[in-house]
């Protein structure tokens, strides 16, 4: 490991998919770190490569995927080089995953108690009785009411939010070091989403796990993440702390994302949509992949790929706008407003949580 | 405050029950009333299972309502008995669906999908007119005419939703029910589709019933909002007012749960927990106009509390109640 604080280090990852149409370059040179105990959010549109990136951490890529180059270091070992058999010892024990749809990620024919107990029997060699006893503790922890009776129920007997709690219980029952949450609340209602997000934060503190949180919902990111990586067309285009990304974004794509969401104060007029659609990764564009949709594109953006420019020790962005020779541009009004706030911001206080009951 | 605008849709005490009289009777929509004025966007929000989609489907008469009255353009929809009347009604009111992948027939070309309504209602004079109409519609929604001979699978989610909008517009409707039209789309594409819908509304004077669970988007696109919960509407009012000064506790809790793309705000988030059991006492509740145009479902003894809340929020100073 380059840095002892890191639990995962991904370097220069490149993944292609073989399809009938040709080779889809899904991940194009992605590098990032996951620190111990932090929540890293990966944000991007569908097709940006956020799910592929994390599936490669789990060794769960589709059969037509080829890892062209790069390394994924976990405990000083490269996950990419591991056999499927080795991966089965890591998956669910050291690195666990929560998927988007709680209905399809549970076995409909198996009682939930046993589904939660299964990883314990498999990875920790517990007897069924002990494992089920621990599963019961886990059910209590994720807030299922009347766990003694419900442990023998089947998934269909639970609502969507409760099912996602069960999925979380399965993922966390072995106290994994890394939890990958792939759009865990997208299928849920806002009120249930808020409960699940609170639960995840609470459990993270208790069992001290690092979380990679994949989502396209910037509101969720703002509430969950310590650090954020923004992906576009198979690349990370900007990363930094949550405050840096939300209040001092530098890449035009990050501007576009933040700008296309209505905020509490958005009044009338039209939303600033990002025009066009993401590029076809069968034949990725030369230079900055976002150039074709960007109002801020310069000639060099279509010729040469921008490297990462340093904004602060923790904040980097891959846009030519940060080059010393680049012309000064004024970001969209909403971004200017955010940057002004960044300039005046004090050191963030510790998170406070209020609950008012009505 | 009398409203001079024309009501295009009046829903009176709509009830939509399923499995009536059986053990598993579901009261999906239970005594819901609201009006929609011509040219406005009415947003219907609620969680899954609140009955918002069922309400939309009952209005367009995909279900036979259990009870209640739906008056569209001055005509009682349940009294449309002849085929011709129903035919005309279905031309004037159209629907846009949530899933742009499931709502387009994969075996039909785009031009035939868009022209299906034109054919059914015999709107085109001849083949040339049909082609022209389809091409104009595609252009209206931001696609180009070369797209007309392609199949749905050749398009992205946002483009498909545009095809769905073109299909709805093909029969020149007055009223469009949009059931979660953007929730399956990416953030950057959502804004494109919402902008398109707004633009079309201005140009063609359309009226929308916008059904969604994404409150920030609903607030943005709607003139007025109705909040549904367990088959009932709990609060109706101007979009900004409902969003910034919600009166009903459920609306408060719903709004407090919306994630905001602002880390500072999120760190100080105050989550309001709603206790639904308070609705299940035996008190009679009805929609009461607490502030001008702002209704809350309340029992007689709750009216005072809501009025106080509205006064505190500055929504009402001296509002005469009747």
Image (cartoon, coloured by chain):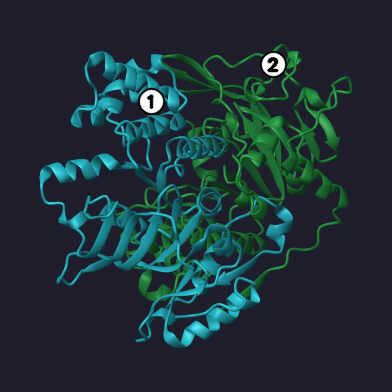
Chain colours: A green, B cyan
User: Is B162 left or right of A207, judged from the image as shown?
Assistant: left
Residue B145, position as x, y percentages in the image: 40, 16
Name, please, the residue furthest toward the right. A324
Give the structural element (helix, strand or loop) at label 2.
loop
Name, please, the residue furthest toward the top. A303
- Chain identifier of the residue bearing label 2 in the image: A
Query: Residue drawn 11% across and 51% down?
Result: B81
Name, please, the residue furthest toward the left. B82
Residue A89, position as x, y percentages in the image: 52, 44
Same chain for mark 2 and mark 1? The answer is no
Give the structural element (helix, strand or loop) at label 1.
helix
Q: Nearer the viewer, residue A273 or A163?
A: A273
Query: Residue drawn 74% across and 56% down?
Result: B264
Numbered label attached to residue A315? none
Point out the image quarter for the N terminus of chain A: top right
Residue under circle 1? B137
User: Is A178 left or right of B231, judged from the image as shown?
Assistant: right
Determine crowd level at label 2: few under 14, some 14-19, many 20+ residues with C-alpha closer than 10 A: some
């Amino acid at each position: 490991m380059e840095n002892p604080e890191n639990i995962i280090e991904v370097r220069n990852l490149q993944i292609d998919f073989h399809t009938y149409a040709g080779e889809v370059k899904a991940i194009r040179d992605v590098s990032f770190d996951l620190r111990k105990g932090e929540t890293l959010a990966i944000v991007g549109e569908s097709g940006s490569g956020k799910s592929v990136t994390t599936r490669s951490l789990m060794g769960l890529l589709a059969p037509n995927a080829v890892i062209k180059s790069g390394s994924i270091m976990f405990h000083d070992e490269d996950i990419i080089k591991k056999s499927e058999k080795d991966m089965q010892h890591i998956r669910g024990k050291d690195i666990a995953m929560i998927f988007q749809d709680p209905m399809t990620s549970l076995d409909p024919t198996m009682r939930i108690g046993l589904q939660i107990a299964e990883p314990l029997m498999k990875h920790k060699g517990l007897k069924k009785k002990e494992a089920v006893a621990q599963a019961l503790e886990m059910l209590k922890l994720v807030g299922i009411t009347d766990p003694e009776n419900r442990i023998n129920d089947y998934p269909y007997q639970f609502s969507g939010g409760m099912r996602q709690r069960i999925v979380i219980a399965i993922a966390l029952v072995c106290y994994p070091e890394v939890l990958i949450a792939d759009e865990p609340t997208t299928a849920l209602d806002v009120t249930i989403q808020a409960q699940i997000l609170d639960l995840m934060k609470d459990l993270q503190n208790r069992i001290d796990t690092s979380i990679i949180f994949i989502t396209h919902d910037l509101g969720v990111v703002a509430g969950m993440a310590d650090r954020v990586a923004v992906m576009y067309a198979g690349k990370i285009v900007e990363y930094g702390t949550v405050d840096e990304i939300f209040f001092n974004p530098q890449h035009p794509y990050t501007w576009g994302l933040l700008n296309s969401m209505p905020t509490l104060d958005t009044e009338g007029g039209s939303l600033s949509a990002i025009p066009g659609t993401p590029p076809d990764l069968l034949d990725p564009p030369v230079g900055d992949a976002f150039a074709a949709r960007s109002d801020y594109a310069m000639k060099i953006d279509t010729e040469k790929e921008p490297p990462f420019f340093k904004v602060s020790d923790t904040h980097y962005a891959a846009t030519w706008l940060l080059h010393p020779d680049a012309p000064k541009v004024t970001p969209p009004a909403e971004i200017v407003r955010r940057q002004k706030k960044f300039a005046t911001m004090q050191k963030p206080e510790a998170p406070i949580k209020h609950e008012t009951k009505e | 405050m009398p409203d001079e605008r024309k009501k295009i849709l009046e829903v009176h005490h709509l009830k939509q029950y399923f499995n009536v009289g059986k053990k598993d009777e579901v009261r999906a929509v239970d005594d819901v009333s609201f009006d929609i004025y011509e040219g406005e966007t009415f947003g219907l929000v609620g969680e899954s299972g609140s009955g918002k989609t069922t309400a939309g489907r009952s209005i367009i008469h995909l279900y036979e309502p259990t009870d209640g009255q739906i008056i569209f353009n001055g005509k009682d929809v349940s009294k449309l008995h002849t085929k011709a009347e129903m035919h005309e009604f279905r031309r004037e009111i159209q629907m846009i669906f949530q899933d742009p992948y499931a709502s387009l027939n994969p075996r039909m070309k785009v031009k035939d999908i868009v022209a299906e309504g034109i054919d059914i209602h015999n709107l085109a004079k001849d083949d040339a007119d049909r082609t022209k109409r389809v091409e104009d519609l595609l252009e209206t929604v931001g696609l180009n005419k070369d797209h007309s001979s392609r199949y749905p699978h050749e398009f992205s989610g946002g483009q498909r939703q545009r095809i769905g909008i073109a299909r709805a517009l093909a029969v020149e409707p007055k009223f469009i029910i949009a059931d979660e039209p953007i929730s399956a789309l990416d953030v950057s594409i959502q804004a494109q589709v919402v902008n398109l819908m707004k633009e079309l509304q201005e140009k063609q004077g359309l009226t929308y019933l916008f059904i969604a669970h994404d409150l920030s988007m609903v607030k943005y696109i709607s003139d007025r909002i109705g909040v549904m919960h367990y088959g009932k509407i709990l609060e109706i009012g101007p979009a900004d007012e409902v969003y910034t000064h919600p009166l009903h506790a459920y609306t408060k809790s719903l709004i407090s749960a919306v994630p905001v793309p602002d880390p500072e705000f999120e760190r100080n988030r105050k989550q309001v927990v709603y206790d639904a059991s308070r609705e299940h006492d035996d008190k009679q509740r009805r929609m009461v106009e607490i502030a001008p145009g702002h209704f809350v479902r309340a029992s007689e003894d709750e009216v005072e509390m809501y009025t106080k809340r509205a006064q505190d929020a500055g929504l009402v100073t001296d509002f005469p109640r009747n």
